[in-house]
Image (tube, rainbow, N blue to C red):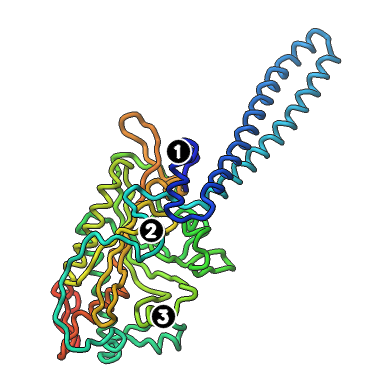
Amino acid sequence: MLTIKQITDNRETVIRGLEKKHFVGAKEAVEAVLAADHKRKVAQGEMDAALAEQKVLAKNIGNLMKEGKKEEADAVKAKVAELKAKSTQLEEAMKAAEEERTELLYTIPNIPYEAVPEGKSAEENEIVKTGGVNRPLPENPLPHWDLAKKYDLIDFDLGVKITGAGFPVYKGLGARLQRALINFFLDEARASGYTEVMPPTVVNEASGYGTGQLPDKEGQMYHCAADNLYLIPTAEVPVTNIYRDVILEEKELPVKTCAYTQCFRREAGSYGKDVRGLNRLHEFSKIEIVRIDRPENSQKSHEEMLAHVEGLLQKLELPYRILRLCGGDMSFTAALCYDFEVYSEAQQRWLEVSSVSNFDSYQANRLKCRYRRAADKKIELCHTLNGSALALPRIVAALLENFQTPEGILVPKALQPYMGCEMIK
């Protein structure tokens, strides 16, 4: 969440940033936070004054008793008791105002960087780069759902029988392709200096608040009501929360972590051709990379993460493009985000396969993830970053569609050691 210092020191800049994200009621939200903070300051000031007066009076009681002035001492005792009661009330008022301020801050999104383009929707995102390989395809290429059926790779109907729509069953070489991609992505992450962890895929409410999934995305997550636990929508949640309430030493930064997990998203209201096949699932596999760094180094970290994801798509020989998201299409928590998309010739559309985001200190403030500077031992908030490297469903869809031939589906050279074959047929 935003810090109160950000808002008090840069009120107009914050309001402008929120408006760039098309956050409704930006000015009113900021004013409400400042009003709650003012109540907190007033209560704290009065409480401090009452405690100071109480301390002075308490010292006089003993002297008055020694001097035999019992009535005066009793009057002072009564005053001290009155001040104690007042201090307790003021402390409660201060805590209530602080809680109100925190709850309001939870509802306010991160403010975007200057580099973020204006715009309300995905149509206004900025294409910053295109690349990859455009392969020759057969006439009237098949979409991946037809290819999956033709080569018996994925059974969508069986998934519906077992669970419901959006939970496919991978079979034979389709299952092997999933495992090949997982191992390839993890090996590449390790080669780039990321330490692999295997976190839980169920998290508590505090973890959801820590990375900003709560209170913004309750409807998108599967909730285990009996235990008040959530199935993760991305490994970002458990991995970043490893560093909740942690003070890192500056020499430990940057922290570079990766994880393979299953991910779960309700995707309520999703329907139509854009969700057919693997385009939008409720359960899917993904490798996530997470970085925690010093504020002055987070831009460099972001660029390195973008280069890592681009390198994966280049090794998979897929046609891709990189988009800088506009204010209206960015997530609640991101300050700057780039999407990677691969092209589906069969579907005649671009498929998002990765988002790589810099959250500035927004998540770190929620998490209380900080570092101790080596020079002066001062403790400051870290910056957090994460990205998909990569999400599997649409990568699988793109591989099936872009590598199809009359004889079968070619396997990219980078995956052949993992697949143990050169073609799926």
- What secondary structure is found at the residue carrying circle 1? loop
Q: Where 148 falls versus 67 (above or below)?
A: below
Q: Residue furthest right?
A: 71
- Name the one closer to the observer, 150 or 414: 150
Q: Nearer the viewer, residue 67 or 25?
A: 25
List the residue tagged with mark 2: 119
- What is the x, y in percent for residue 8? 50, 37
- Estimate the spatial distance between the alpha carbons at disc 2 and disc 1, rounded to whole Å: 23 Å
Tell me which residue sits at (34%, 79%) in the image.
278
- Kind of residue at badge 3: Phe
> In what quadrant of the picture does the C terminus appear?
bottom left
- Tell me: 195 left or right of 84: left
The local crowd at label 1, few if under 14, some if 14 to 19, many if 20 or more residues have their Cα within 10 Å, is: few
The amino acid marked with disc number 2 is Gly
Residue at 17% over, 79% down: 411
Q: Residue furthest top?
A: 67
Q: Which mark is residue 167?
A: 3
**Residue 393: quadrant of the picture:** bottom left
Task: Pick whichever of labels 2 and 1 is earlier in the sequence.
Answer: 1
Give the Cα separation between the discs numbered 2 and 3.
34 Å
* Nearer mark to the viewer, of 2 and 3: 2
Secondary element type, mark 2: loop
What type is the residue that disc 1 sits on? Asn
Q: Which residue does the numbered mark 1 point to in the structure image? A: 10
**Where in the figure is residue 106, as x and y percent of width and height?**
52, 51
User: Mark 2: few, some, or many residues within 10 Å (few <14, many ≥20)?
Assistant: some
Circle 2 or circle 1, nearest the eye: 2
The residue lying at 28 percent from left, 68 percent from top is 341
